[in-house]
Amino acid sequence: MATIVEKTPVQGDAPNPISPKELSRRKLLMQLGLALNGVVALAIATPIIRYLLFPLKKKDGYLSWISIGDVNDFPEGGTRLVTYRNPFTHPWDGETGNVAAYVRREQGNAFTVFAINCAHLGCPVRWFEQSQLFMCPCHGGVYYSNGDRAAGPPERGLFKYPTRVQNGKLMIDAGQIPTLAGQQAKLVKGIAPCPGTSKPTIG
Amino acid sequence: MPWYKQTYDWVERRVQLEGPVREAIEHPVPRNTASWWYVFGSASFVLLLLQIVTGILLAIVYVPEAGEAWNSLQVLNHQLPLGWFLRAMHGWGSNFMVAVVVIHMCQVFLFGAYKFPRELTWVLGVFLLLMTLGMAFTGQVLRFDQDAYWGLGIGASISSRIPIIGGPIVHLLLGGPIIAGATLTRFFALHVFVIPSAMLGFAGLHTWLVIKLGINEWPTPGRIVTRDTYIQEYHELTHKDGIPFFPYAIWKDFVFSAGILLAVAVCAAVFGPYGPTGQPDPTIIQTVPKPDYFFLWIYSILSFLPVWMETPFMLVAPVIGIGAMLALPFIAGVGEKSWYRRPVAVLSVAILAVAWATLTHLATYEPWSPKMEAWSGAAVPVKYIHNRTPLELQGANVLQEKQCRNCHMLGGVGGERGPALDGVADRLTEDQLIRQVLQGGGNMPAYGKNLSPPQVTALVAFLETLHPDNEHPAVDESRPLVETTAVDTPAMPAPAPKGQ
């Protein structure tokens, strides 16, 4: 900015050449004006940034226990596709507010609920009852009926929702798209996280 | 004086734009740049304008709401007169724009146009390329069909791999915990306001630099660019043997741009609009999502990377690629411009072009993906069930029922994930077949738990028949020695193993 001000008086036909004293005052005033703009811009930017960050919530802020059906809806040894309404939706979300999941009932109250999203890049895997496999249409990821990785590019098994049974209802702790976020430490070393543990692996 | 001349003068006395405009368009350019190779930049800009006009026309109908966007596209396609044509123009305009921008980039790269003093022009161009691709991706999202929905899922999946901040990045990208209304509105804002305005600004500055620094001369082998002499040499070139850009060179830009616009219109009229494919309902899982053509090569790469390389590749490769493009004029800013003296440059373009074409071609038939309907849709060829024993026929049944065909071809139909099974008995002995079926391996799932012993017996009996008529199936050389039957009998009719 300083250079621009210095050049201003050079313009030949300026009616009144500016004296050095006057120039230094002009310069100060201009810098003051710029600084004022900077302060105001900062003051405006702060709420804007806060506004833009609205999708961020603290850890587990997007998780909630929801019922996905009656325990008796699921036959033992079977895998069923269920759909539920995501707990965090707006009225205008339409059908995108719905989510699908696979429920596998081993026996009694032992359930495993898989996200339909392939652990590779999130495409919807399909369940094949006859061969007891989940297959992904995008890059050919294949999983066994217990969610373990069977073949293809996925580096781990299917994502699982934490489950519990309450008053005869099957509940899952869900609400956000399952991704690999937070697993890089393990992945970078090339060790896939152990699927099939009781530890929740969701989002 | 006619009325229009009077009006023009009246306006001109006030805006005084004639001088600067004349100066800009009549600036001298080297004679040899009035070439058909120099038309791609202006064509890119014309396509940008076409996209803005058709985009505005679509925006007066499109509803950027997750629950209604898909329906509004149906209305455009089927109910509004020529709504389909506008969508097709915008879609094909986008295809052409990506293609022309990439060709423009290859041309200026091969002509050494990024060298001194045009480094910044190139850098702005790199950003314009990225924004063009950004527009292509966000535009695909606004189509808000199944491809858009799962494409966003892939975007979220890739973002989630960023260490530490992956989770928050996903939520920022999607505008919430899942792909939904907030996702569509933020991509709408990006596609309609943010990126286009940035593009116009960048394209304006890019053009300004072309006018100020002069258009790159046709490279001559041996004419070396140096920081000390180039400006002087270029000045002499344009002033001794130069021609005014307007009208000596620009007519080719006009003709080419008109041709491109016509090509967009013809493609739009003949091939029609893109989709939308199925509704963006995540509970419909009978879908095979696929990106638009300019991203197919990425889709291919992601299916071939070894597991350990995926996350590093997805996160590091784009940084290296973009970084290399931005650094290019600062690393190779002087020296030869001619492609005759720049073998590495020519080879790089050739290799990238071949790699791109190969990956894109592969993505059109996705040999790596199971064909989800093959097991029920692709029949076993009749010749393979002719004159077979009941056990072998039962095996053919197992092959179909257990979805083997989703990954294995038979008679040229079925998946290509695994090898075709025609002639498999030539490659694998009976024991090897059993082992492969039960334990899997080599990217095949193990079927041990999902097949009963009789099913395995039947399946392998059928697979053993898959060999050319004039050849015996493969046999383990040691097998006859342990067989209790006559040594000279081949293993083919040997009884199937008990149990497994």
Image (cartoon, coloured by chain):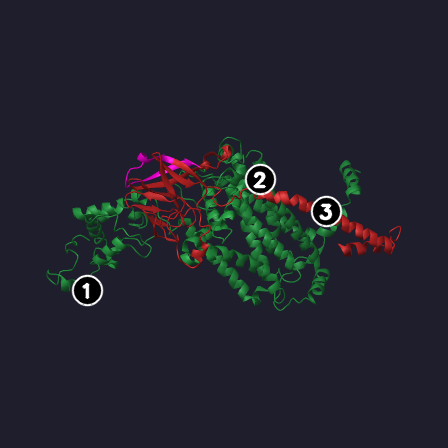
Give the crowd class for mark 2: few <14, some 14-19, many >=20 residues within 10 Å.
Answer: many
Residue B423 makes an appearance in the image: no
Q: Position of residue B295 (x, y in %)?
A: 48, 50
For this orientation, the residue located farthest to the top is B79
Relative height, residue B110 to residue B101 (above, below): below
In this figure, which residue is indicated by the disc labeled 2?
A: B55
In the displayed image of the protein, which residue is found farthest to the front?
A167
At 66% from the left and 57% from the top, the residue drawn is B215
Q: Taking A38 as reference, is A87 left or right?
A: left
Name the one closer to the observer, A59 or B347.
A59
Check the picture and name the quadrant holding the N terminus of chain A.
bottom right
Residue at mark 1 = B477
For disc 3, the marked residue is A37
Q: In this structure image, what is the colour of chain A?
A: red
* Horizontal and vertical percent position of residue B59: 57, 36
Point out the stretch of residues depicted in magenta.
A68-85
Label 2 or label 1, whichever comes before in sequence order: 2
The chain drawn in green is B
